[in-house]
Amino acid sequence: MKRLAAVLALALIMAGAFSLREAAAPGYQVEDPRTGETTWLVDDPDAAYHLRRVELALVSGRVPGSDRYLNHPTGSAIPWPPFSDAMFALVASALADEAAAGKSNSELGGYDEASIEAVLVHLPPLFGALICLAVFAAIWSLCDRSSTRTWCALFGAFLYACTPIAIWYGGVTRIDHHVVIALLLAIHTAMVTWSLRAKKSVDAMTFAIAAGIVAGMSIASWLAAGIFVGVTGIAYFMRALAADEERAQSGARAAILYFTAAAGITVIPAANSAWNAIQPGSLINLTNGVPRGLFAAIIPFVVIVFVRRRTSASSSSRTIAGVVAVVVFGISLALLPGFLSGAQEGLRWASRENLFMDVVAESRPLDSIELLLSKLTPLALLFPLAWLGLFPSAVRSAERAHLVLLAGVLAVMTMGQQRFGNAFAIPFACVCAVALHDVARRFADTVLRKAALVGMAAAALSVLPSARSVFQTTPDEYRDLAEWRGEVVRGLRWMRTNTPSPGPWNAPDHPQDYAVLSSWGLGHMIEYHARRPTITTNFGSFVGERNFVEGAKALIETDPKEFLRRVRELGADYVVVTPRLVSDLNSTMRIAGVNPATLFQRDPTGVKRYSPAATQSALWKLALHDEPVGSKHVRGTELVWVSERREMTSGLRPQPGLPSGPVLSIYRLTDGRDRNTAPSLESGRR
């Protein structure tokens, strides 16, 4: 394939990846002054909190490690490490416009909030396009020289561009660490492959340093990135035990440089992490235990170099070197302060017994064929065969072993939790493409080779329907989505400017006078759009198990007096609800420790209906109503804002005879909690 044609084809794939991700999230932009200083309707909770953290970084010059907006009133350390938000803030500081003189957001370090959003919402699609380039490079380096090498690399880039779960995570407005991790993982995979394949020692070590830097950045964005760092260590371990002495020595040195670079990148953020005081040695949050563990990973490779220099190049001496290295490594980890307890903590959080993991959609498994096909294209059915087909070459090749191990580990984790699917999409594309290459290169006959290319084209066509699904939103649906998101953002933005300030929003260490009670799923939206602290947030019990449970207990309370007592104890002055929260009553009851079986009961005709445990709960009364602003239909509260649009608990438009309510309702507590600066009801709806 001619070079120019390949470049043009790759550019077309990258442009297509960007366009798919821009089209994947319709209804996110509206020109409507009623939403305040924003035209982008960011309603992804994680993206909303990343935006808040970026703004705090722009104000103070550093990414905060803790926030009093979480887990009111004590606040909490922030689970996400700082690198991805620091990168977002750097881009925003370079490209966002300055605020106009006298504007209310001059407290935002001189930047214009709408401009910050307008810049950052397009980064995920851009990263998606760049990942295609990195995937192409990784596959190119994994394939032998042949006439189908370029075709296979282009196929892998195309497959990643069209993988639905990758499109979803890279969609416009999805400003999240997951898309950053995917970009870093793709670059890391290419760098590690080049390092392991390198014939010259200097090349192996140079690429190892580059890969180590990327690995450190990944860990400083999301601790789960340690998974692919560990897989890389195994691949380097294989090369360090190679029969060729020169190749083995360069592999061991490359591994030492790799882990040194990764540890060096994480030292400063780990030393400044608020989690050191709470979870020393943690493996699920960034602490000093992370760089210590990375430095400990250097030890087995030092042992291998030492032992092999003093023994023969026989297979038995290589085995002895490997066994000694593993034993020394295990001992060093066991001696690290807090490492073993941190490992136990990580397993506890990954367990399905963890209540928060049970209620978060991203933590649920891909446990059906329908889900696999919808998230990973029809090629997911052929992936096991492709993966097994690479095993023979993986035994002989450290770089192939790296890909096979990475794909296998991430596949298992994706089956357990969907959140790993975006990262898995990268080795998924690489495995499918490399397996196709291995099949095609065996055909020396021109006709058979052309038949292999036709098969590759058919495989590419099979993934198009999955990617096409993002274009199936009609103009009416687009407007409907924009209207719904507009109502949510509008209400929270109204709350930002029309309710008393509990304290400075841009000082994350400053105590806050009061907080907002809502379901944990609305926490980050309230923290960013309303600029108000919350009782429970999207980090769930991760940042405050007591509030996570007590907030749920308050919302399902059926006794009005008990509801007010619980809300007072939690320190909330406002309550924000939507009808959709009622549809999630099942998980809310489980969080509160109540048997969800009491949520429904059969009427005399045998029809399943909501029980009094649901219809008499505070959440039901607050969310499902037809009351105007100023209403005090729920004891001790006053309705201060209500949206024009209404919906049922399913999110559909109201139907006769079925419970419905405003898209968003905001209540102020009046029972002994009035403040001197009460909101103006004229600013609300109706």
Image (spheres, rainbow, N blue to C red):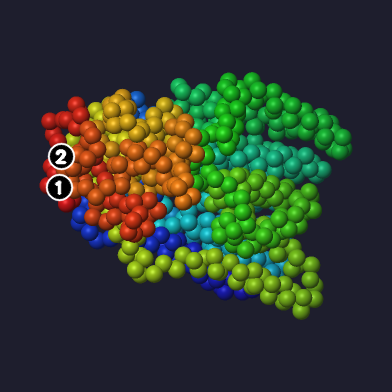
Secondary structure under the numbered disc 1 in the rendered image:
helix
Q: CA distance from mark 1 to mark 2?
A: 8 Å
In which quadrant of the rendered view does residue 449 lie?
Answer: bottom right
Q: Is residue 572 left or right of residue 363?
A: left
User: Which residue is rendered at x = 19% and y = 26% of the image?
Assistant: 672
The quadrant in which the N terminus is found is bottom right
Q: Is residue 652 left or right of residue 633?
A: right
User: Which residue is rendered at x = 64% and y = 32% of the image?
Assistant: 297
User: Which residue is rendered at x = 18% and y = 50% of the image?
Assistant: 685
Q: Amino acid at mark 2?
A: Pro
- x, y (%) of residue 586? 46, 41
Question: Which numbered marker is on residue 679?
Answer: 2
Question: Which numbered marker is on residue 683?
Answer: 1
Q: Vertical placement of 40 versus 295: above or below?
A: below
Q: Nearer the viewer, residue 485 or 248?
A: 485
In which quadrant of the rendered view does residue 67 lie?
Answer: top left
Q: Is residue 308 left or right of residue 374?
A: right
Other residues around mark 2 within 10 Å, as few (<14) / some (14–19) / many (≥20): some
Q: Amino acid at mark 1?
A: Ser
Q: Vertical placement of 358 versus 559: above or below?
A: below
Contact (Cβ within 8 Å) of mark 1 with mark 2:
yes
Q: Is residue 111 left or right of residue 301?
A: left
- x, y (%) of residue 528? 31, 43
Other residues around mark 1 within 10 Å, as few (<14) / some (14–19) / many (≥20): some
